[in-house]
């Protein structure tokens, strides 16, 4: 089965620094917008979890249908999100 994922690096001011669609499925613009929306919606959850836990890898912070958002929080609060 072909699948895609969206990888985004977000600065501590919630500004996207880098974005890439990764996967083997054909690129569709509507999926790219959906991935952006899901990652943006997960930022609120990530901001709350980042200050309440000592863990740097926040496994599954949000779900939408079969899509899961995973986040790693660096010491400078840069967020690589997948």
Image (cartoon, helix red, strand yellow):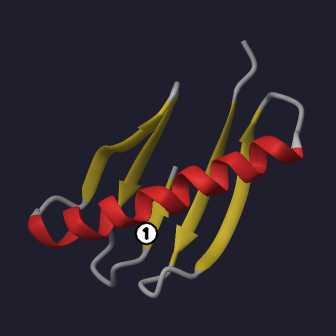
Q: Position of residue 50 (x, y in %)?
A: 22, 68
Q: Position of residue 71 (x, y in %)?
A: 39, 55
**6 sits to left or right of 78:** right
Say which residue appears at 65% left-offset and 48% top-offset: 35
**20 sits to left or right of 15:** right
Say which residue appears at 75% left-offset and 19% top-offset: 2
Query: Pointer 1: residues within 10 angstroms few (<14), some, or many (20+)?
Result: many
Task: Name above or below for residue 12 compared with residue 62.
Answer: below
Task: Name above or below for residue 59 compared with residue 72.
Answer: above
**80 sits to left or right of 62:** right
Q: Position of residue 21 (x, y in %)?
A: 74, 49
SS state under label 1: strand
Relative to the observer, which residue lies in front, 7 or 52? 52
Say which residue appears at 36% left-offset and 59% top-offset: 72
Quadrant for the N terminus in the image: top right
Q: Position of residue 73 (x, y in %)?
A: 32, 67
Task: Name above or below for residue 52 compared with residue 67.
Answer: below
Relative to the observer, which residue lies in front, 78 or 33? 33
Say which residue appears at 61% left-offset and 76% top-offset: 16
Task: Name above or below for residue 13 compared with residue 64.
Answer: below
Q: Label 1, on which residue? A: 79
- The quarter of the picture where residue 45 lies is bottom left
């Amino acid at each position: 089965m072909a699948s895609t994922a969206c990888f985004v690096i977000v600065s501590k001011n919630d500004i996207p620094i880098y974005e890439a669609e990764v996967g083997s499925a054909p690129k569709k613009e509507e999926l790219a917008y959906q991935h952006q929306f899901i990652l943006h919606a997960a930022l609120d959850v990530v901001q709350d979890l980042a200050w309440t836990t000592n863990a740097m890898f926040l496994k599954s912070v949000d779900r939408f249908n079969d899509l899961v958002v995973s986040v790693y929080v660096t010491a400078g609060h840069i967020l690589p999100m997948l």
